Image (cartoon, rainbow, N blue to C red):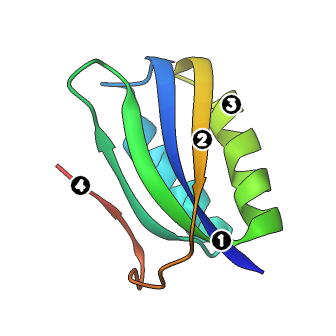
């Protein structure tokens, strides 16, 4: 079943290629949505796709890339909208 989640990743996640990591990971799982830096130093976004793939995606975000130091991942499940055709980095 398709679902969606709004996520927020805190820690050392800006200036370390984290948005690219999130986008690449989402595309590997076939998810759609977006990611962007937040003014408080976190990275936020929305991902849509099959529930099990979103769960796996969120697990990868907790690990992060080699330059990041993830302190926390929050997610807020949402209704699937189908509005997104790809996964984009927003600025």
Q: Which mark is residue 3?
A: 1
Measure how far apart labels 2 and 4 are at the Cα level: 19 Å
Q: Earlier in the sequence, mark 2 or mark 1?
A: 1
Q: Secondary structure at mark 2?
A: strand
> Mark 2 vs mark 4: which is more N-terminal?
2
Judge whether 41 appears above or below 36 on screen. above
Q: Nearer the viewer, mark 1 or mark 4?
A: 1
Residue 62, labelled with which disc? 3
Residue pictured at 23% horizontal, 55% vertical: 90
Give percent across and percent down for residue 26: 57, 62
Cα distance between the residues tagged 1 and 3? 20 Å
Residue named by callout 2: 75
- Dot 3: element: helix
Q: Residue at x 58, y 45 (%)?
A: 76
Query: Distance from label 1 to label 4 (Cα)?
Result: 21 Å
Few, some or many C-alpha atoms within 10 Å of disc 1 (few <14, some 14-19, many ≥20)?
Answer: some
Determine whether label 3 and label 4 are within 8 Å by CB. Answer: no
Q: Which residue is mark 4?
A: 90
Label 4 residue SS: loop
Q: Nearer the viewer, mark 3 or mark 2?
A: 2
Quadrant in the rendering for residue 78 = bottom right
Q: Residues within 10 Å of mark 4 (few under 14, many from 20)?
A: few
**Real-space Cα separation, disc 2 to disc 1, in angstroms:** 12 Å
Query: For residue 54, which numbered disc appears in the image?
Result: none
Label 3 vs 2, first from the N-terminus: 3
Residue 63 left/right relative to 87? right
The x, y position of residue 16, in whole percent, is 39, 26
Q: Residue at x 37, y 25 (%)?
A: 42
Whole-percent x, y for residue 85 in the image: 41, 85
Mark toward the start of the polypeptide (1 vs 3) = 1
């Amino acid at each position: 079943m398709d679902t969606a989640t709004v996520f927020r990743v805190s820690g050392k996640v800006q200036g370390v290629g984290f948005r690219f990591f999130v986008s690449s990971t989402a595309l590997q799982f076939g998810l759609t949505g977006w990611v962007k830096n937040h003014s408080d130093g976190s990275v936020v976004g929305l991902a849509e796709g099959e529930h099990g793939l979103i769960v796996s995606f969120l697990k990868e975000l907790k690990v992060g890339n080699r330059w990041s130091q993830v302190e926390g991942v929050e997610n807020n499940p949402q209704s699937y909208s189908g509005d997104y055709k790809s996964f984009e980095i927003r600025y």
